[in-house]
Image (cartoon, coloured by chain):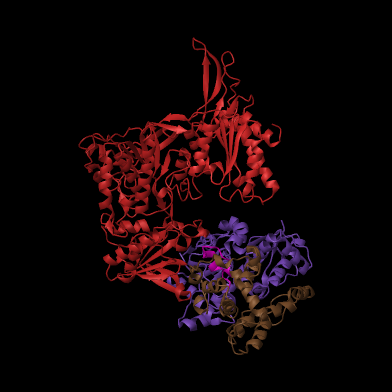
Amino acid sequence: MSHSEHHNERNSLAYSVEKNVEVIAQKCYQCGKCSAGCPVADEMDFPPSMVMRLLQTEDPANDEKILRSHSIWLCVTCEMCLSRCPMEIDIPSVMDFLRQKSRSENKVNKKAKNIIAFHKSFLNSIRFTGRLYELGLILDYKRQSLNLTQDISLAPKMISRGKLHLFPTMIKGTAQIARIFKKTSN
Amino acid sequence: MARIGVFICHCGENISATVDCGKVAESIGKLKHVVLSTDYKYMCSDPGQTLIKDAIKEHKLTGVVVSACSPRMHEPTFRKACAEGGLNPFLCEMANLREHCSWVHEKNDLTTEKAIDIVRTQVEKVKLNSALQPIKVPVTKTAMVIGGGIAGIQSALDIANTGHKVIMVERSPSIGGHMSQLSETFPTLDCSQCILTPRMVEVAQHPNITLYTYAEVESVEGFIGNFKVKIRKKAKSLDEKVCTGCGLCTTKCPQKKIPNEFEQGMGMRPAIYVPFPQAVPNRPVIDKEHCTYYLKGKCKICEIVCPTKAIRFDQPDEILELEIGAIVVATGFDIKHADFFPEYGYGKYKDIIDGLQFERLASASGPTSGEIRRPSDGEVPKNIVFIACAGSRDPAKGIAYCSKICCMYTAKHAMLYKHKVHDGRAHVFYMDIRSGGKNYDEFVRRAIEEDHVNYIRGRVSTVYERDGKLIVKGVDTLLGGQPVEVVADMVVLATAGVANAGAEELAQKLHVSYDQHKFFAEAHPKLKPVETNTAGIFLAGACQNPKDIPDAVSQASGSAVKVAALFSQEMLTREPLVAVVNRFCPPMYSTCVGCFMCQSVCPYQAIEREDFKTRDGKIIKTVAKINEGLCQGCGTCVALCRSKSIDLLGYSNNQVHAEVMALLNEY
Amino acid sequence: MKVGIYPGCSLTGSARDYNESVFALAEAFGLEFTQVPDWNCCGATAAHNLNKELSLALPARILAIAEKNGLEEIIVPCAACYSRLVVTQHELKKDPELKNRISEVIEMDYRGTSKILNVIEWIDKYIIPKLEEKTVKPFNYKVACYYGCLLVRPNKILNYDRVEDPQSLDIVMNKIGATPIDYPYKTECCGAGLSISRTDIVSKLSGKIIEDAEHRGAEAIVVACPMCHSNLDMRRPDINKYWKTEFKIPVIFVTQAIGLAIGLSPEKVGLKRHFVDVTIS
């Protein structure tokens, strides 16, 4: 078996990352500069440099840890890691990919429930109106997170300052938007 | 009558595994003028070579073809064997049956046929070979060492001690280089200047060494053994023979606030200055860019106070033309400075300094007399952070290599700090610790175990200032990427070592190769670390790549021996495979028409003009002439010459034509 | 040249003050722009977190519509939308196969020819030239210019300003008489889209930004992103509670600051809609 054939049989998460995001995990020499500059590193179970380390071991047990981690959902895509990485590793794109893989394999960390609920509510809102209907987003989020009292005090102030519309704005192309959602769902 | 001997080598199994050597020998033996055609297992071995020598005598051979490996491997071997057998070495050719045939094909009839073709071409060529004689050029037994740092000093002393003359050219006012700026050296913590200055004085006093400081190389022409170097002695604005080095002028100069290069900007100097107290030569120079007289025409206080009237404001630069036989390049390196790092403040924060600046602080002769003090407010830092790999191993910043010395000097700096500030806390943010020299790792362990320097594995993302302190945001990767924040009083960056300013220009003047980082290129990364691809020019020290003092000194001594070897010969021998412009008797003189297009394309500037004159000096014809001392036999002029007046000895038009025709089976 | 504007969901929603100040400036300087017709949400953070193709398709539709309507330049005041649009344009340019796929998804022809400008680029090009003559009330305050994450990163794609210690916003503020301070938190994240799902993290991060600005004596934080504004302004009660301090520093949009400098009233530029009282004007 030639070297390249052996290469094709890698079924690690790192290999998927390489194929989809064009990031070679082995480039990371674990300097930790990403974790040092990451605003949410101290909240994460695995700071970004650890996620890269787990990835580059190509060990199925470590792949599981990554996909089931809280870290990938806490990442706010501030892009600070990439801007300082000496190897210019596109960690934000890796994170996006890991998030989607985590969901598609049903391995989402329970602690990230609310974060995902928020994202889903956001997209649900756009799917029907074409633009964000903030009130709808909040109500849908509360339904998913079951946190009914959160931010209640903000509502009157937002309304009085004209920052919260009570009704959504529907764009004309809502059908087209719905089709876009359908075509990109998998 | 040609009598050619052909030897087919098996090269163990390298050739015979795919080529039927016996069949090749048999086939070649049938060619016209081939009087001997045999095969043997190892032609390069002793018995193999004896085979050739005996055959030359026995069969009265006029030409030899050894069909074996690449000529790059063994051409000298077989040429020498032929010479020992009594045959001119240039009547020996090699046919490459290994790299060109056996190693690139499978075993079959076609491979053997190809081998036969290859041997046949060389047989036809060698019939047209001439018995060339090596070219001898004289050697000027004076060496030039460019650069007066520790490598240059060591090389100069070693060459001078073999009895040959050395000219050392150093562009700053004093020799000593970066080593003179260091406080202590690792791993012994020897005082750097204490071990260096005796060598510096030795250079100045050595009868075989002529030292030119404040001088630079202007141009280099010629070739090995015969360089013509012009150096520019920049005007120091004083008469060195009259100046006693008393230093009075430097104390009276009114311009006192010029950033001192030796102190890496941490201290000031006047416009007329001696770089440091132990400078060799201990004579001041006037910095024309900052001197009031040169800028505005006023002042002249130094001239007034000088007791020996040594100041010469109108002194011009002097150009010296020197005949040199070998050049050692020891121009050293520099380091990146703090303004290179955007995430560490672009040089905005005064208390973020680089390694050399720290050395000056630690040095007893430095701007703070050896006390570690913050440049911003002069306070002694109680919490100091050292950032290793600041710039090195950082492809995003364009420097992917490791600068080799920083792990060691960072440990040294941390230790010096702890020795001076007992209640201080030192932290080192590192990625790896590279301490591979003798007693090096023990040195680093001492810093960690005895001096309690806090080593944290992780890089620093950013450093910024707040309330006069520096906030260092790093990480501990050994704790799983846990962020670590240190509030420091001072931060020292172990910055990347880079090529010295002007390295590229000098390399181009010398026609020496260099890499994308402007470090000079050695001839072979493993086996020829002190030679360059330019014959006669050698390397020593950090101009080749960042290295520590023991390595620089070793390399310097290595370069000195190469120079001594060169100088041990009265004449230099060159291979006679050079181009030659034809010559005939008058009135033709040469078929060359004197267009000199060859001169414009020759990469080695080897083509000269020759005038043919009448008896009363009138020029009849000017034609091209090849300088056989410079010609490398590339053949560019041969291909270009429109009148076909140039031919290449050893690869003449006839010889190459014979090879081609032999390949086409028309011979 | 036809200039378009893509307000995005924030400007027509909770960042209404920003929208008002942008249009107020346009009016004052005689600038016209066409809203991208029937524009949709760019997908913001949610799309790229959950669905890559969707995160490219939504911005692509916006850009395709803009192209179809001949809008050669599109002003995008929201930094997050700006980031999504530029990144989408870059990704689709880099990968022609992907571009074709997305064209198919949005059922529109996409060429990627419009030039996308962020709010500071818009100010630089259209407002700075006439700013000096219109400045009647110099904004003589010490300000901390907060760029946020998405105006300068990812630097290789956005190619805007320098990624460490950027200066473009500082320069604009300087032109209206403000004194920008040396501010290390210029591009540190405020917590972004975790405002609702992890308000504690936003409180922590935004609090650091505010604390440092106040500590350095800034009288206002100037922003160019509605998400940042929301986290630093609307979330102030949460921040104060988390840090057990009363942070009072107001947060204003750069367009509001310019509006005040050219003599517009605080109401006109939407200052009354803030959560944190803007005492300077």
Look at the image and give the colour of chain C. purple
Quarter occupied by residue A186: bottom right
Residue C93 spot, x, y in % from top left: 69, 60
Return the x and y of residue B218 as percentages of the image width and height.
Answer: 42, 36
Is residue A88 in the magenta section? yes
- Chain B tint in image: red
Residue extending furthest left?
B307
Please state the horizontal and vertical placement of residue C101, each as a whole percent of the image: 75, 66
Q: Examine the rendered structure and indicate whether residue A35 appears above or below residue B70.
A: below
Assign the magenta stretch its main secondary structure.
Answer: loop
Q: Which chain is brown?
A: A
Q: Nearer the viewer, residue C242 or A103?
A: A103
The reply, left or right, for residue B648 in relation to residue B422 is right
Q: Is residue C76 above or below residue B588?
A: below
Q: Residue furthest front?
A: B58
In the picture, measured across the screen, residue B70 lies left or right of residue B478, that is: right
